[in-house]
Image (cartoon, rainbow, N blue to C red):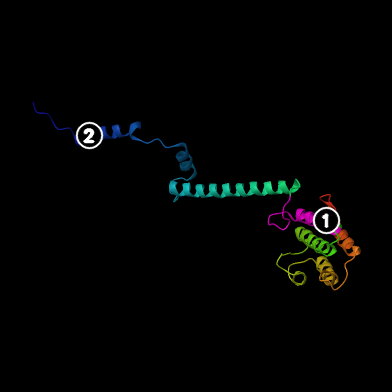
Amino acid sequence: MRQEPIPAEDVTAALDEVLRRAEFHETPSLFQRFLDWLLPDGSSIRLGELQGVLLALFIVLFVWMLVSVFRGAARRRALAGEEFDPRAPGVAPELRAARLCDEAGRARAAGDLRLALRLLFEALIVAMDGRGDLEFRPAWTNRELVRRGRHTPAASALLEELVRELEPKEFGRERITEADLARLSALLEPYLADRGGRAA
């Protein structure tokens, strides 16, 4: 018995019905559905590109968190009274100024008035820089500090006066007195008052 050929339309309809079944379709992931909702058709961003951007953002966030953790640990150690270099980068200006004052107090107690003078002057500059009264860069000499940077008028006048008075004493041409140290300590007091500290 001869069988009639199946019409092409029937084959196409049966094939379409089979191909519409769920097992022939990949179910989109939750992320893919979110992406389809976020980026409607016609968007030029591809899934791979978006994953690359998200990975880069994750790496940046991770590095930022690590840096924050290490800075926080360094600050906590410093606040706990552990030894640290007050000139190290990343130390808060008010903390640096307080520690420089502590060093100046030890130098003063040991009779090294020249070192105490230098440390108190540095503490004052660091404290003023921390408050935004002047711009301080460690590589500048005192005279460069007077000439350069963005200082408030009051800070500029005070700085010029102090450098003119203290430079001969610092370099040994004039004698350093307790009054010189007391004056610098008095100038530092307002900057350290917020931390409850005292200048040496």
Q: Residue at x 85, y 63 (%)?
A: 113
Q: Is residue 46 visible?
A: no
Pick whichever of labels 2 and 1 is earlier in the sequence: 2
Determine which residue is flagged by label 2.
11
The front one of 15 and 142 is: 142
Up-down relation of residue 142 to residue 11 (above or below): below
Image quadrant assignment for residue 92: bottom right
> Looking at the rendering, in which quadrant would you find the C terminus?
bottom right
Q: Is residue 66 visible?
A: yes
Determine which residue is flagged by label 1.
106
* Image location of residue 26, percent across then percent down: 37, 36
Task: Based on the picture, tell me whether residue 101 belongs to the magenta stretch.
Answer: yes
Which amino acid is tagged 2? Answer: Val
Which amino acid is tagged 1? Answer: Arg
Point out the stretch of residues depicted in magenta. 83-108
Could you tell me how far apart the alpha carbons at marks 2 and 1 are, in whole angstroms? 99 Å
